Image (cartoon, rainbow, N blue to C red):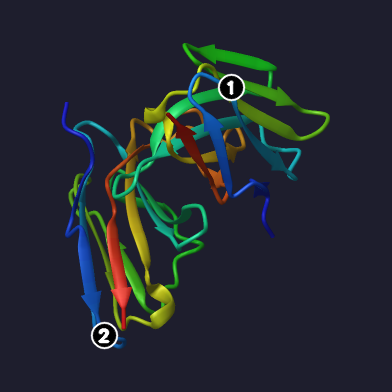
Amino acid sequence: DQQVKQNSPSLSVQEGRISILNCDYTNSMFDYFLWYKKYPAEGPTFLISISSIKDKNEDGRFTVFLNKSAKHLSLHIVPSQPGDSAVYFCAASIRGTYKYIFGTGTRLKVLA
Amino acid sequence: EAGVAQSPRYKIIEKRQSVAFWCNPISGHATLYWYQQILGQGPKLLIQFQNNGVVDDSQLPKDRFSAERLKGVDSTLKIQPAKLEDSAVYLCASSWDGGSTDTQYFGPGTRLTVL
């Protein structure tokens, strides 16, 4: 039972354009969401998070949007840079617990 | 500040052999996690420690996997005997206190290949 889904295994974007990575979840109890970035041969690195009391959170070029009614979140990267090329995982957790449930990841390639 | 350290980085063994992985978390982090990441999937939590106590090991295959964190600092994860399906990257992560909004910091992982 995949509670967190990333339906696009890969995405290619031109440098300078917007990258949009999507994530869907099925458990309405999830109330905290995160995005991690992973380069080859490295561990995942925390990127940005959002609580369910918000619908948007920004950090520099990265913005996460949360649509609770649709059980959908997205990560926007503007402008995209070649160094953003990596695998992006979304994760979800339930407040009061500690467990992150990860999606399967989306491989982003930013073309110079 | 040093990050999460893991060793070895790569390991190749034959099925039915034993293997052990080591993790040293970020200094001061009370909570330590071991994840298994199979190719094409996201990380899956195997076990969580709070200091030297186990908080959750519900997804740890206890017939073959074991983990310990004796002094509440570094940890070892062991597989005995290994199966082909154990081929994966084993990630260690740590966080301050293990709360749901507490950021987990990951090590580089150990890539295990079971032949």
CA–CA distance between discs 1 and 2?
45 Å
**What residue do we see at 56% from left, 21% from top?**
A17
Q: Quick check: A112 above or below B59?
A: above
Q: Position of residue A89 (x, y in %)?
A: 52, 41
Identity of the residue furthest to the bottom in this view: B16
SS at badge 1:
loop
Q: Position of residue A92 (x, y in %)?
A: 59, 38
Q: Tag 1, which chain?
A: A
Q: Position of residue A15 (x, y in %)?
A: 48, 24
Instruction: Tell me, for residue B14, which label it has, or none.
Output: 2
Q: Is residue A5 left or right of residue B21?
A: right
Instruction: Tell me, for residue A18, which label it has, or none.
Output: 1
Amino acid bearing label 2: Glu
Q: Position of residue A103 (x, y in %)?
A: 58, 47
**What residue do we see at 29% from left, 68% from top?**
B112
Amino acid bearing label 1: Ile
| Residue toward you, B12 or A107 | A107
Q: Is residue A8 left or right of residue B108?
A: right
**What residue do we see at 30% from left, 45% from top?**
A42
Q: Tag 2, which chain?
A: B
| Residue toward you, B18 or A14 | A14
Quadrant containing the N terminus of chain B is top left
